[in-house]
Amino acid sequence: MNSQTKVAGVILAGGRARRMNNQDKGLVSFKGRPMVSYAIAALAPAVDFVVINANRNIEQYRQFGWPVISDQTGSFDGPLAGVLAAMIHVDADVLVVVPCDSPLIKTEHLRKLLLALAENNADVAVAFDGARLHPVLFAIKAVLQTSLQDYLADGQRKVADWLARQNLVQVDFSDEPEIFSNINTMTELSALEAT
């Protein structure tokens, strides 16, 4: 990234979290802190500014000091709807997208995504753990906004399917796959807190 490139961090906290008894995952406590605070801590040093994509508990998310952006629709259309909302609202060339429920992701991992995006002249750099892609952890150029709008307008929702259509580079994190631990249930929360 050159010094003129504006980079926004986007935290995806817009889901329903049905497997967490519909609790708002970003606000669920992990080791004494709301999960969203880990995403903010990882993003803030790597980007110019942060936005949080949330569709409920907006006021609680605003208390973290960053703008909160909701999806364009109220139908919980998945992670890509959150990415599109961010693209529409932020003035940035590149977005670094992270989920709100992966508290082990650190700044260095996000910098690695940004570096891979620039070095490979790709449009998207997606995290890869050696076995599979992690399609909600990526750096993406804002020029893909029209492609994303068209995909969602077509009724499509699958992140991996849309990413596969782009000029994509996989970023290898196979030496530390544990960073992708995400928390979808209270059982997973307890297990990760015990580590």
Image: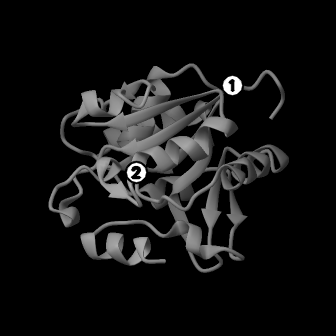
On the rendered structure, is 75 left or right of 165? left
Q: CA distance from mark 1 to mark 2?
A: 29 Å
Residue 134, how many percent across, how many down? 53, 64
Q: Which residue is mark 2?
A: 33
Vertical arrangement, residue 145 with respect to residue 166, above or below: above
Q: Secondary structure at mark 2?
A: strand
Q: Where does residue 10 sit, x and y in percent of width and height?
A: 50, 38
Q: Residue furthest left?
A: 21
Whether residue 185 is situated above or below residue 79 in the rendered picture: below
Horizontal arrangement in the rendering, residue 105 relative to residue 117 (left or right):
left
Q: Secondary structure at mark 1?
A: loop
Q: Amino acid at mark 1?
A: Lys
Residue in view at x 48 percent, y 53 percent:
162
- Point out the tag, 1 or 2, that comes first from the N-terminus: 1
Q: Is residue 1 above or below residue 36?
A: above
Which amino acid, by three-letter code, is at mark 2? Arg
